[in-house]
Image (cartoon, grey):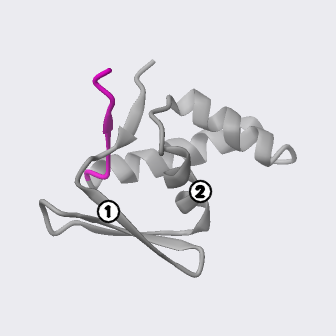
Amino acid sequence: MTRLRRHPDALATELDGEAFLVRRDSDAILRLNPTATALWHALAEPATPEELAGLFAAAFPDVPADRLAADIDLALAALRAHGMVVDDPA
């Protein structure tokens, strides 16, 4: 499975539990809610979507695993669409 990482030109600024991501090389700006901010923090190291889902499943054991995986997939798709997350070449 493909590991994902933060784009090297993506910068984050946090305010009241939310992150605002910007790309130094474009005009892309993205506001993250607290859950997506936690996902951004989890991507400090490259990870697969399955690894991220496992991390969130451990943090939120009362939420069905399939729902967590679907939410993570949606968030990763948005991060990819804005160029904030890319495949890790390693």
For residue 31, above or below residue 15: above
- Say which amino acid is labelled 1: Leu
Disc 1 crowd rating (10 Å Cα; few below 14, some 14-19, many 20+) is some
The span shown in magenta is 83-90
Residue drawn 59% across the image and 74% down it: 17
Which residue position holds label 2? 38
Q: Is 56 within the magenta?
A: no
Query: Reading the chain from its start, which is encountered first: label 1 or label 2?
Result: 1
Quadrant placement of the N terminus = top left
Q: Nearer the viewer, mark 1 or mark 2?
A: 1
Q: Which of 21 and 69 is in front in this view?
A: 21
> Percent from the top left, x then y, of residue 32?
47, 67
For residue 33, above or below residue 89: below
Q: In this view, does 84 lie to the left or right of 51?
A: left
Residue drawn 54% across the image and 69% down it: 33
Question: Seen from this angle, which residue lies furthest right?
Answer: 62
Judged from the image, the secondary structure of the residue bearing numbered disc 2 is helix
> Percent from the top left, x then y, of residue 39?
55, 51
For residue 32, above or below residue 89: below
Judged from the image, the secondary structure of the residue bearing numbered disc 1 is strand
> What numbered label is drawn on residue 49?
none
- Say which amino acid is labelled 2: Ala
> What numbered label is drawn on residue 11?
1
